[in-house]
Image (cartoon, rainbow, N blue to C red):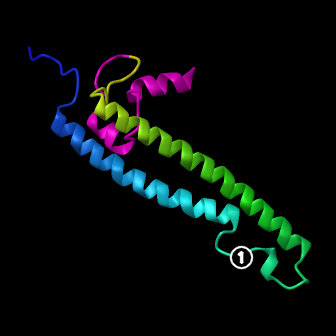
Amino acid sequence: MAEEKTRYSDEELMEFKAIILEKLDKAYRNFEHLRSSVTNSDGNDVADTSPTFKVLEEGANTLGKEEAGRLAQRQMKFIQHLQSALVRIENKTYGICRETGRLIPKERLKAVPHATLSIDIKNDKRRK
């Protein structure tokens, strides 16, 4: 009987690192876009409009900023998870389920590269 792998090979880890770096780059761009919508760094704020700026428009603008702020926070959390995954790659602990100690299947890691739980464990936690 073949011995079960306890970690991914260095070559496999480099493949995952490339996937994570690509997702991280995209996540940073999305975060910057969201941040600029919250801070009006694109110049579309109340200061450059006529005095007839309507209260409803202002309210809608505030709601849009709040939503963009929430999305930016979620994006930053995603970035932090991806950065943690890069640390696990460097430590050669990437892809090991933190509950079972077994390897998380490659398919799951390709879909969710920051995963720390196998899909079975993740589903069990959701049911509880």
Residue 119 is covered by the magenta coloring: yes
Q: Quadrant of the N terminus?
A: top left
Quadrant for residue 40, please give it: bottom right
- Helix, strand or loop status at disc 1: loop
Q: Is residue 31 above or below residue 56?
A: above
Q: Which residue is drawn at 55% across and 24% down?
A: 127
Judged left or right of residue 40, residue 111 is left
- Mark 1 residue type: Asn
| Residue drawn 28% across the image and 49% down it | 18
116 and 2: which one is in front?
116
Residue span colored magenta? 100-128
Could you tell me which residue is drawn at 30 percent across and 28 percent down? 91
Residue 58 x, y percent position in the rendering: 84, 69
Q: Quadrant of the C terminus?
A: top right
Q: Residues within 10 Å of mark 1 (few under 14, many from 20)?
A: few
Image location (x, y in percent) of residue 121:
43, 23
Q: In which quarter of the image is residue 26?
A: bottom left
Q: Nearer the viewer, residue 119 or 31?
A: 31
Q: Name the residue under label 1.
A: 44
Give the image location of residue 75, x and y in percent: 55, 49
* Horizontal and vertical percent position of residue 13: 23, 37
Taking the image as shown, residue 118 lies to the left or right of residue 18, namely right
* Residue 125 falls inside the magenta stretch: yes
